[in-house]
Amino acid sequence: MPRADGKEFSFLSEEHIDSSYLETFNFDSKNQYIETTTREFSAVCPFSGLPDLADVIIEYYPEGGKCVELKSLKYYFVSFRNVGIYQEAATKRIYDDLKSLLNTSRLKITTIYNTRGGFDTTCIEGEL
């Protein structure tokens, strides 16, 4: 995206989001509610080239007998850092990757983005 001074912002394509970082551990408690949160999610707005910063809330029941390992989740989130992706698409991508990984139908991803241009945006994908 060119800036007013003719310089360009550069960012990576969505192909650079690396779900292979995600790992699980076995956990046999299908009715335990798990909530994991972080305030450290960032990606790049593909329209403006500016960073999008968000809180992410992951809620799930480990019906598939698996939990996401948190350090692997952190590395996965870092892979978004320089990727140009819209807020809604980032939320859906996190949901799709975790749903596949955890094999659960009870998963909810909420992203609460910092105010941008006077607009607050919260995206929710899935349900418990």
Image: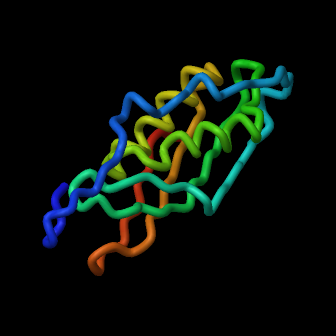
| Whole-percent x, y for residue 70 in the image | 76, 40
| Whole-percent x, y for residue 48 in the image | 24, 61
Name which quarter of the figure residue 32 lies in: top right
| Vertical side of 98 occupied by 41: above or below | below
| Vertical side of 57 occupied by 26: above or below | above
8 and 76: which is toward the camera: 8
Point 58% across, 36% down: residue: 107
83 and 40: which is toward the camera: 83
Name which quarter of the figure residue 118 lies in: bottom left
Q: How many marks?
A: 0
Task: State left or right for residue 31 relative to residue 53.
Answer: right
Task: State left or right for residue 65 relative to residue 101.
Answer: right
| Vertical side of 45 occupied by 127: above or below | above
> Which quadrant, please, contains the C terminus?
top right
Point 64% across, 45% down: residue: 59
Point 20% across, 62% down: residue: 7
| Whole-percent x, y for residue 120 in the image | 36, 72
| Whole-percent x, y for residue 63 in the image | 70, 23
